[in-house]
Image: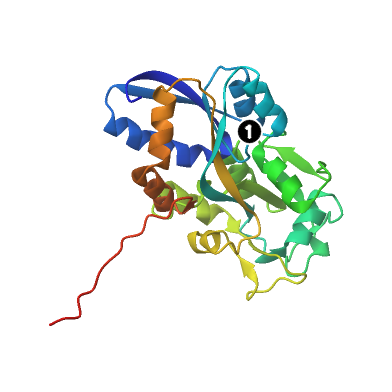
Amino acid sequence: MVTGHTTIAADEALLPLINAELDVFHSQYDFATVDCKYGSEYDAINLLLQEKVRLALVTRPLNQKEINFFKGKDINPESIILAYDAIAVIVHPDNAINYLTKSQISDILSGQLVTWSQLEHSGKTGNIKQILDSESSGIIRSLVDSLNLNERITGDFEFAGDNKKVIELVAANPDAIGFIGYNWLSEGDNMKVQEDLKKVNLIAISGRQIADETNSFKPSLSSLFNLEYPLTRKIYAIYADPSPGLARGFLAHLTSERGQKIIYRMGLKPENDFQRLVKINKDY
């Protein structure tokens, strides 16, 4: 379980987090090599179904049809919650908007809000340009599910290809609004993240009818722990292997105290909250 070579698959929106976990795992086990194929959520699960990988890291559990497929092969798949990430909403720094409601996000993605002049306080009049990572991404599926979009995103949108390019395109287009995995911006001590946060503005989202500073939240460790950010989502490890191997070893690392603390360090909410209990002796 801690030697040899294996390949896993993951949603590209989770790349910073998974790379951080792989770095620590490889530093701990010198004779283990875990390669990760990054792509869309659809691609990662498809590789699992084709039995080309035994572990996929995505933002949804297997559905019943997929579970039945594996059971037909005498494999009992596991969908294990690892952490809580979020979909971050970003705009160009010239955009004066600080808050949006979930319904406004829904109206933008469904093509009902098409110009910035339809939104108060944007200070802009151009057409709203939606920037998304890829057509079969977990971000789009999560937005469709959480906003009840009937599996349709319309309006003026562009697929950047990956989350890094979403940030670049939003930073270059004053009329753009982008949707990325929050773990791309969550590690505050990372110099690259600090540079990216200077290029774009992170929008606070409200679940109320009218958004203001009292009911709107940006994605953060605090808002994920308190479930205050409306576009929070779970990260799943889906394991489908009839026998233990290196993929199981990496999964054990992800669910271990060390693996969960890496998630916390990255600014996300781990599924397992490892607390340090201190007993105070009041006898003097």
Image coordinates for residue 141, horizontal then vertical, percent:
71, 41
The reply to whether residue 120 is in sight is: yes
Q: Is residue 109 shown left or right of residue 20?
A: right
Q: Which residue is mark 1?
A: 41
Q: How is the image coloured?
A: rainbow
The residue carrying pointer 1 sits among few (fewer than 14), some (14 to 19) or many (20 or more) residues within 10 Å by Cα, namely: many
Q: Quadrant of the N terminus?
A: top left
Q: Identify the residue at horizontal 28%, vertical 33% (top origin).
A: 28
Report the front residue among 277 and 93: 277
Above or below, 121 relative to 53 = below
Residue found at the far right of this picture? 112
Image coordinates for residue 242, horizontal then vertical, percent:
50, 20
Above or below, 260 relative to 63 = below
Q: Identify the residue at horizontal 36%, vertical 23% (top origin).
A: 33
Residue found at the far left of this picture? 284
Above or below, 43 relative to 94 = above
Q: Identify the residue at horizontal 69%, vertical 45% (top origin).
A: 142
- The amino acid type of the residue labelled 1 equals Glu
Number of marks: 1
Above or below, 235 relative to 38 = below
Q: Quadrant of residue 62?
A: top right
Q: Quadrant of the C terminus?
A: bottom left
Q: Is residue 283 shown left or right of residue 218?
A: left
The reply to whether residue 97 is in sight is: no
Image coordinates for residue 174, horizontal then vertical, percent:
68, 53
Q: Quadrant of residue 77?
A: top right
Q: Is residue 151 shown left or right of residue 99?
A: right
Image coordinates for residue 69, horizontal then vertical, percent:
67, 22
Say which element carries label 1.
helix
Q: Is residue 102 shown left or right of residue 163?
A: right
Q: Identify the residue at horizontal 71%, vertical 64% (top origin).
A: 100
